[in-house]
Amino acid sequence: MQQRHYPPAPSQVYLFATCLVDLFVPQAGLDAVRLLEREGLTVHFPRGQSCCGQPAYSSGNPEQARAVALAQLDLFAQPWPVIVPSGSCAGMMRHHWPLLFADDALAGPKARELAERVYELSEFLLCVLKVDFSATAAPLAPETVVLHTSCAARREMGTRAHGVELLDALPGVTRVEHQRESECCGFGGTFSLKHPDISGAMVADKVASACATGGQRLVSADCGCLLNIGHAAARQGAPLPVEHMASFLWRRSGGAGEGA
């Protein structure tokens, strides 16, 4: 993976919240804003934003994906970083939007310029803002957690290392690794709908492997994976609550009291 150049910390950023955060885990979006604002940034949220187009794209419908992406291109007109609390959506915007518009003389340059400003949240916190959560750490009870990094976040955005470093720097937090950490959780967007039996077996393996560590909670920066793993654990009666990385970082660094 090509080494990325990180700019100095800005004063203003955009938030692309993702449709899953908007519809299912809004607290993660709010906590992402709080993390950024606590570092002194002004966060802008263009209200016309919707989906990154990944479901259509990964289902083999590039024209529909182009239409969805095209509707977003002019929403982020200022040269500010675009922060995404999802490695998979960030990967779609950074790596696939330029490909979608490669032959478009008007939209192509916009997509390429915007892609260079897209950052996954933990990447931005660590590499651009250089956060130090030890200075704001809350006096909370010790907690042992398991990290799950989505396939796209791990392989396209390379953000597992960022999540590891952020979690390991939090006082009172112990991160434990499990045998199937590098494997897909089985969600895969429309994959879980097209191949439910395979998807179900994959997430069952993921839940069992995470629980075998004795970890008290699974943390991830991708809501699709969180919803899949969390619902599977609940159906199995497994003791594995899940939490978005933004909410976990906010809570453990003094932003809020103990979560459920």
Image (spheres, rainbow, N blue to C red):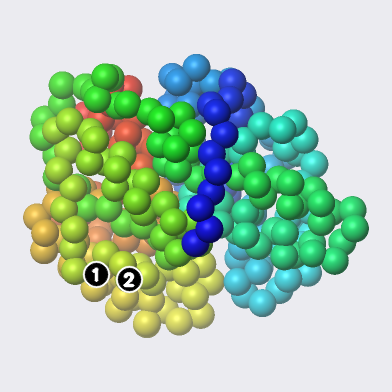
For the point 16% across and 53% down, the residue is: 176
- Report the side of 90 relative to 35 (left or right): right
Label 1, on which residue? Answer: 180
Q: How many marks?
A: 2
Name the amino acid type tagged 1: Arg
x and y percentages locating residue 85 in the rendered image:
49, 43
Q: Is residue 245 visible?
A: yes
Q: Residues within 10 Å of mark 1 (few under 14, many from 20)?
A: some
Q: How far is the residue under mark 2 from the one under mark 1?
A: 5 Å
Q: Is residue 244 visible?
A: no
- Report the side of 117 relative to 208 (left or right): right
- Work out whether 86 lies above or below 177: above
- Work out whether 55 lies above or below 251: below
Residue situated in front as seen by the camera: 119 or 256: 119
Query: In which quadrant of the rendered view does residue 45 lie?
Result: top right
For the point 85% across and 66% down, the residue is: 103
x and y percentages locating residue 216 in the rendered image:
15, 48
x and y percentages locating residue 63 in the rendered image:
78, 69
Name the amino acid type tagged 2: Glu
Label 2, on which residue? Answer: 183
| Labels 2 & 1 near each other (Cβ < 8 A) | yes
Q: Residues within 10 Å of mark 2 (few under 14, many from 20)?
A: some
